[in-house]
Image (spheres, helix red, strand yellow):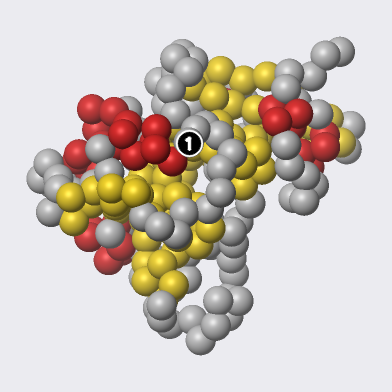
Amino acid sequence: MCGRFTITHPDEAIARLFDAVIGNDLPTVPRFNVCPTTQVAVVTSDGGARRLRAMRWGFIPHWYKAPNDGPLIINARSDTVATKPAFREAVRSRRCIVPATGFYEWETVEGRKLPWYFTRTDGQPMAFAGVWQRWGEIDTVAIVSTEAGPGMRGLHHREAVVLERADWPLWLGEAGHGAAVLMKASAEGVLRCHRVDVAVNSNRAEGAALIEPLIA
């Protein structure tokens, strides 16, 4: 699952990495505590022309009368994304990538929520698989999650789908059909993690200190 993440790479660097044109409405970076309902940078592709654009993290189904008309939808489960009415059209024709530097996950120890910070072992930005939906004049996105793999250390039973670079064209719809095979956990060795301070438990917390390794 993915409920909080970071994006510390400059927009220009992310745009170069994804070979995308930068939009003029992107949220300010760096961000060390990206929370649901805020604006996030998203990569979309229209006929192979990629854009880095802003979307609301929190997918709004077309039948909602207001953004808060139902549950807040920040993740789409890989096992039901193709059949659930909220996502089935989006996963066919509106797939996207949510760039990130890392993400947080929590373990519960004696009633306390202790946060861990995950990044790629190779130091490269992450590419979360996403699906998006236009609701009125708002573009909204959900991050696809799947069964957790070995990199999660048993902290949670689900994790965000992290796409490898070679798979970006297929997920974005540029390389034909068959993107369903990409909705899987990261292979062993792709992710690394370290404990961080409980300050990040607050969705109002911000700053580079949030991702610093916790010294026992």
Q: Nearer the viewer, residue 140 or 208?
A: 208
Kindly identify the residue that appears in the image at 72 percent across and 22 percent down. Answer: 212
Q: Amino acid at mark 1?
A: Pro
Image location (x, y in percent) of residue 44? 29, 52
Kindly identify the residue that appears in the image at 28 percent across and 59 percent down. Answer: 94
Answer with left or right where residue 34 lies relative to residue 55.
right
Answer with left or right where residue 117 lies relative to residue 24.
right
Image location (x, y in percent) of residue 177? 13, 46
**SS for callout 1:** loop
Classify 10 Å Cα crowding around label 1: few (below 14), some (14-19), many (20 and above).
few
- Residue 124 visible within the image: yes
Q: Is residue 93 above or below residue 68?
A: above
Dividing the picture into quarters, in which one does residue 170 lie?
top left
Query: Quarter holding the C terminus?
Result: top right
Image location (x, y in percent) of residue 186? 42, 26
Dividing the picture into quarters, in which one does residue 97 lie?
top left
Q: Nearer the viewer, residue 70 or 171?
A: 171
Answer with left or right where residue 176 lies relative to residue 198.
left
Image location (x, y in percent) of residue 16? 31, 34
Query: Quarter holding the N terminus?
Result: top right
Which residue bears the numbered disc 1?
Answer: 10
- Residue 148 visible within the image: no
Disc tally is: 1
